[in-house]
Image: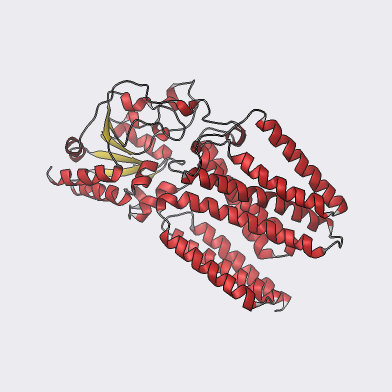
């Protein structure tokens, strides 16, 4: 393949990446955007393999197995497990970049590499290895394989700092001498750093962690692109890195936190043992709730991770349709960090064919709530906790919340009074205007739908 042909095809692939990313900005065009970007990546992969004149007898079966595993996983994964899948993808992307860059160093076999190439190799291996182990620690926390609470030990920050200094020092020695020993030290220490960087971060901060790790996987890919002089990889990695950083910024602002506080604050250590402390609650039944909803003018649904766990998005849509048939206006209030992944609630509701114009962001929801008759909170906890607004001593004080207590009536569907990811109690549950319906979200909504038929 000529250089000009390869460059042109890489340019087409890069344009597909950019168009696909742009279309991902709206649920209406997201599916086609994903298809366009995937087609661009397929083109880039094929061009790279053809240009490298690889042995298809070896690579072909590998591609086939990978495609089958990827397709099987994508079809079978539950929406509730999507954050774990994204974390795993981030990890695999990081280690793939590190392995490709490391292979270039090994292939040199003692020959002196250009300074810029050597720096790119070190950066790719360092970031890729950290992303790999960090992502799978996040996966384990989300999957419940290890506890979601922060894991800390005395002197942890100092130890991590010393490891970081050590890996930078090893990088300098590798650059100067191009000796294999400090190079392998970089990879080994980076793997350890990935674990130590994520274990002190609690489950409440997982949306931020996933966004950051996604960005890091892109940075590692871009660095590897410089190593192997692949423009498509550089552009694709840069797009992922930049978009991940933007998303990380959005997530931290939505939680009124700084990135440093998320990474080094050990959030949730003190709050982790907090249980119900607010006193008595007022309960309701699906039948009583059906009456309140049927005679309402405006209803706002606030989904949380409990909706995802119960896979109740379709039942939610059915209840909303029944209310709309009775002339009730229905909207959905989406907090930026609801669920365990950025955009988690939007994807779930889109799966149930909820109209996009009914999905309101944080500010739109809060503007509507004073004119709302009933708010239906489905498994959300921290994102509707008024302590973030009223209690200066709360760990989540200052975090923007959906102010559901400004509505005339609040109904919370939840299994129990257990705290959310932040590990703190929610005084909303004990307020006079709040009704609790203790149940699995899907079961409660199914019963509610049946009760609405009789109203």
Apparent side of residue 124 relative to residue 18 in the rendered image (left or right): right
Q: Looking at the figure, which quarter contains the N terminus?
A: bottom right
Apparent side of residue 82 relative to residue 191 in the rendered image (left or right): left
* Colour approach in the figure: secondary structure
Residue 432 picture quarter: top left
Residue 49 at x, y percent in the picture:
65, 73
Residue 295 at x, y percent in the picture:
18, 38
Examine the rendered structure and indicate whether residue 408 appears above or below residue 227. above
Apparent side of residue 218 relative to residue 305 in the rendered image (left or right): right
Examine the rendered structure and indicate whether residue 339 appears above or below residue 75. above
Apparent side of residue 206 relative to residue 183 in the rendered image (left or right): left
Instruction: Please tell me which residue is depicted at 63% across the width and 39% down the height of the picture.
Output: 196
Instruction: Please tell me which residue is depicted at 67% across the width and 60% down the height of the picture.
Output: 234
Q: How many labels does the image show?
A: 0
**Residue 243 appears in the picture as rendered:** yes
Q: Looking at the figure, which quarter contains the C terminus?
A: top left
Residue found at the far front of this picture: 145
Q: Which of 208 and 299 is in front in this view?
A: 208
Instruction: Please tell me which residue is depicted at 64% across the width and 55% down the height of the picture.
Output: 95
**Residue 304 appears in the picture as rendered:** no
Residue 353 at x, y percent in the picture:
33, 55
Residue 374 at x, y percent in the picture:
26, 35
Q: Nearer the viewer, residue 369 or 387?
A: 387
Residue 427 picture quarter: top left
Instruction: Please tell me which residue is depicted at 62% across the width and 30% down the height of the picture.
Output: 153
């Amino acid at each position: 393949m000529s250089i000009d042909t390869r460059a042109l095809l890489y340019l087409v692939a890069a344009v597909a990446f950019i168009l696909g990313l742009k279309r991902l900005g709206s649920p209406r065009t997201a599916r086609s955007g994903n298809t366009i970007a995937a087609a661009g990546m397929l083109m880039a992969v094929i061009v790279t393999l053809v240009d490298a004149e690889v042995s298809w007898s070896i690579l072909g079966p590998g591609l086939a197995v990978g495609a089958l595993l990827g397709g099987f996983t994508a079809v079978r994964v539950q929406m509730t497990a999507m954050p774990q899948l994204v974390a795993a993808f981030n990890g695999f992307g990081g280690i793939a970049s590190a392995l490709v860059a490391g292979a270039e160093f090994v292939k040199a076999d003692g020959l002196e590499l250009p300074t810029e190439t050597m720096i790119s190799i070190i950066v790719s291996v360092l970031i890729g290895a950290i992303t790999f182990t960090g992502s799978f620690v996040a996966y384990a926390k989300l999957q419940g394989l290890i506890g979601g609470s922060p894991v800390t030990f005395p002197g942890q920050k100092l130890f991590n700092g010393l490891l970081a200094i050590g890996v930078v020092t090893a990088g300098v020695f590798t650059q100067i001498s191009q000796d294999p020993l400090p190079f392998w030290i970089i990879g080994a220490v980076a793997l350890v750093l990935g674990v130590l960087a994520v274990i002190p971060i609690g489950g409440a901060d997982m949306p931020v962690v996933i966004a950051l790790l996604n960005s890091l996987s892109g940075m590692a890919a871009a660095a590897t692109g410089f190593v192997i002089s692949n423009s498509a990889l550089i552009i694709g990695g840069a797009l992922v890195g930049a978009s991940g950083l933007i998303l990380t910024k959005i997530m931290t602002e939505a939680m009124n936190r700084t990135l440093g506080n998320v990474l080094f604050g050990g959030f949730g250590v003190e709050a982790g043992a907090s249980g119900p402390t607010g006193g008595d609650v007022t309960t309701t039944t699906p039948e009583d709730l059906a009456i309140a909803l049927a005679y309402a003018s405006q209803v706002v649904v606030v989904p949380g991770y409990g909706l995802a766990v119960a896979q109740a998005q379709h039942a939610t849509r059915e209840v909303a349709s029944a209310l709309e048939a009775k002339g009730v206006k229905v909207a959905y209030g989406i907090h930026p960090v609801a669920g365990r992944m950025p955009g988690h609630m939007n994807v779930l509701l889109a799966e149930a064919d909820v109209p996009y114009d009914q999905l309101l962001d944080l500010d739109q929801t809060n503007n509507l709530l004073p004119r709302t008759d009933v708010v239906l909170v489905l498994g959300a906890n921290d994102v509707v906790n008024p302590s973030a607004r009223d209690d200066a001593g709360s760990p989540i004080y200052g975090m923007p919340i959906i102010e559901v207590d400004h509505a005339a009536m609040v109904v919370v569907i939840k299994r129990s009074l257990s705290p959310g990811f932040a590990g703190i109690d929610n005084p909303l549950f004990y307020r006079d205007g709040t009704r609790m319906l203790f149940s699995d979200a899907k079961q409660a909504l199914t019963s509610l739908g049946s009760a609405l038929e009789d109203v």
